[in-house]
Amino acid sequence: MAVLKRAGASEITMPPTCTACRSRTPGKLGATGTLLATQADEIASVQADVVVESSGNYRGLTSAIRGAARGGRVVMVGLLPSGEQPVPISLAITRELELVGAFRFNDEIDQVIAALADGSLYVEPVVTHEFAVADALQAFSVARDSATSSKVLLRF
């Protein structure tokens, strides 16, 4: 969301995967609206020009395809498991969607580091906990609980 806002997106709707996440950070990062990922009818009514799918789950990709406007673009950031996936490809075809895969970073990492350094990429609300590297086991335990944590950092 922070990258989309920095890039000039005027409307950003995020479907958090849990009810507790819905109010925790989306608005602070630039989201103009939220809806639950389980509400398929609401997602389908969004009709976004660009949808970024980052869950790595076929249900997420299905929602992304349904939530994209005719002629829209679905960017697949989430890595789905190998093998066949039950997604509505016929809907992508009839809506003339552009499905684009995005895997790893190449040149973008330099831009992200620069944006973090100059403060133009605001990500502070995502970081919920920070631990000394000596407390890594505790950090991983906290990170495992998505109801209370988002990004957990280790200080070296």
Image (cartoon, rainbow, N blue to C red):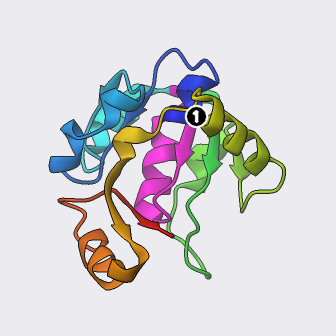
Q: Which residue type does callout 1 highlight?
A: Val
Other-residue count near label 1 (Cα within 10 Å), few / some / many at <14 / 14–19 / ≥20? some
Q: Quadrant of residue 121?
A: top right
Name the residue that disc number 1 marks: 3
Question: Relative to 18, does residue 29 appear above or below in the rendering?
Answer: above
Q: Magenta span covers which residues?
A: 48-69
Residue 81, percent from left and from top: 55, 78
**Which of 133 and 106 lies nearest the eye of the viewer?**
133
Which residue is painted at 52% across and 14% down in the image?
A: 10
Point out residue 88 in the picture as x, y percentages from the top left corner. Answer: 53, 55
Q: Nearer the viewer, residue 156 or 52?
A: 156
Quarter of the figure with residue 60: bottom left
Front residue (pair 10, 127)? 127
Task: Please tell me whether mark 1 sits on a helix, a strand or a loop.
Answer: helix
Q: Is residue 29 left or right of residue 80?
A: left
Estimate the x, y position of residue 143 in percent, counting from the top left.
31, 70
Quadrant in the picture for residue 13: top left
Q: Is residue 59 magenta?
A: yes
Q: Height in image: 135 above or below 104?
A: below
The picture places residue 92, in percent across and down from the top left corner, at: 61, 45
User: Looking at the image, can residue 52 be seen?
Assistant: yes
Does residue 96 belong to the magenta stretch? no
Q: Residue at x 42, y 48 (%)?
A: 63
Q: Nearer the viewer, residue 156 or 96?
A: 156
In this rendering, would 105 be left or right of 149? Answer: right
Q: Is residue 151 left or right of residue 147?
A: right
